Amino acid sequence: MEFTTIEQNGVKVTIVANDEKIITDIQSALDLLATVDYETGANRIILNKDTVDDSFFVLSSGLAGDVLQKFITYHVKVAIYGDYSKYTSKPLKDFIYESNRGNDIFFVSTKAQAVEKLINAR
């Protein structure tokens, strides 16, 4: 796992890169939160969609809700970037839409959009 930390206007954002899945269950998400905090001190994390297990995007699996609740509980904002066009589930599209309306969880197309969202999130 490789971390790149950006700091703008006093806000630290860490971009996490990896060739393998990083988030596969609740424990892997907690491990990521702890590692990023320890190594970078950032509480805003950017992930490529490809590093998140596919079951995350099947809402009935419960993984997305459980993982994102951990991010909220530990006051960590997250942006996941990538191509979401292959997903046709209306509940997932609604979930993404509602998440993007908030200030803690974002699903965007590009890394640049992810950085912008997290730098500007309140």
Image: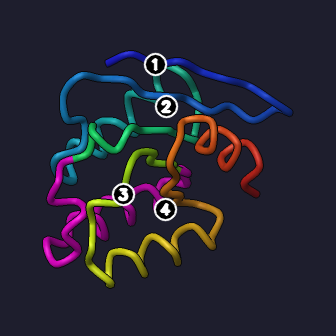
Q: State if disc 1 and disc 4 touch (CB < 8 Å).
A: no
- The alpha-carbon separation of the residues under discs 1 and 3 comes to 24 Å
Image coordinates for residue 13, horizontal then vertical, percent: 62, 33
Density class for disc 1 (Cα within 10 Å; few <14, some 14-19, many ≥20) is some
Q: Quadrant of residue 100?
A: bottom right
Amino acid beneath label 3: Tyr
Task: In the displayed orientation, state which residue is furthest to the front.
Answer: 85
- The alpha-carbon separation of the residues under discs 4 and 2 comes to 14 Å
Return the disc, 1 or 3, that comes first in the chain's sequence: 1
- Of tags 1 and 2, the one toward the viewer is 1
Q: Quadrant of residue 115?
A: top right
Q: State if disc 2 and disc 1 touch (CB < 8 Å).
A: no
Does 83 appear above or below 88? above
Q: State if disc 3 and disc 2 touch (CB < 8 Å).
A: no
- Of tags 1 and 3, the one toward the viewer is 3
Residue position marked by numbered label 2 in the rendering: 37
Image-based side of 103 in relation to 22, left or right? right
Density class for disc 2 (Cα within 10 Å; few <14, some 14-19, many ≥20) is some
Q: Which residues are magenta?
A: 53-77
- Most foreground residue, 81 or 71: 81
Residue position marked by numbered label 1 in the rendering: 3
Q: Helix, strand or loop at disc 4? A: helix
- Of tags 4 and 1, the one toward the viewer is 1
Residue 64 sits inside the magenta stretch: yes
Please name the residue shown 62% across and 70% down the image: 102
Residue position marked by numbered label 4 in the rendering: 72
Residue position marked by numbered label 3 in the rendering: 84
